[in-house]
Image (cartoon, rainbow, N blue to C red):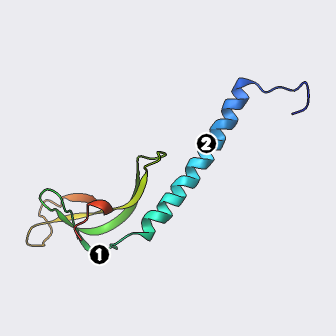
Amino acid sequence: MSKGDYMELNDFRLKAQEIRSLAEKEVRKLGKEFAFSKASAKIGDTVTCKFGVKQSLIVDDIKFSMRNYLAKDEKPECVYFGFVLTKAGKLRKDGARGRIYESDLLK
């Protein structure tokens, strides 16, 4: 800006929002890359949660989560989705679906 030019508050807010939006996209991209580099299961695998009733499922979709997004303690990790299995390892009759976070996997 040259001398005599000035920025309106609204112009500042629009530009700041644009910068934040681009930064958030880059952080999510980095988080996805990190999470999938640490994935311990793939589609078709059976995974079990280490908590509660130790629910198991057969993985048919993998996404990622960034818990505490844009915080200093954020932790990107994979989330495994699939059909819930019975204790005998068979698909449940009701077709129930579940999800298990990478950090909750029984390994």
Horizontal placement of 100 versus 30: left or right? left
Dot 2: element: helix
Q: Pinpoint residue 30: horizontal percent, then vertical percent.
A: 53, 60
Q: Nearer the viewer, mark 2 or mark 1?
A: 2
CA distance for labels 2 and 1:
38 Å
Quarter of the image where one finds residue 62: bottom left
Q: Which mark is residue 104?
A: none
Tally of numbered tags: 2
**For the residue carrying disc 2, how many other residues have a C-alpha within 10 Å: few (<14), some (14-19), or many (20+)?**
few
Q: List the residue tagged with mark 2.
A: 20
- Name the residue furthest left: 88
Return the residue nearer the eye: 41 or 107.
107
The residue at 54%/53% (across/down) is 27
Give the mark nearest the N terminus, 2 or 1.
Answer: 2
Please tell me which residue lies in front, 29 or 91.
29
Instruction: Identify residue type, mark 1.
Output: Gly
- Quarter of the view holding residue 104: bottom left
Q: Quadrant of residue 79?
A: bottom left
Q: Report helix, strand or loop for mark 1.
A: loop
Which quarter shows the N terminus? Answer: top right
> Which residue of the protein is positioned furthest toward the right in this rendering?
3
Q: Mark 1 sits on what residue?
A: 44
- In the rendered image of this protein, does residue 82 appear above or below residue 26? below
Quadrant where the C terminus sits is: bottom left
Q: In the rendered view, tell whether residue 25 sits above or below residue 54.
A: above
Tag 2 near tag 1, CB within 8 Å: no
> Where does the image place residue 53, in percent across and percent down from the top left?
11, 59
Q: In the image, what residue occupies the spot 38% across and 69% down?
A: 39
At a point 41% along the width and 46% down the height, the residue shown is 68
Give the residue type at disc 2: Arg
**Horizontal relation, residue 83 to residue 24: left or right:** left
The residue depicted at 43 percent of the width and 51 percent of the height is 74
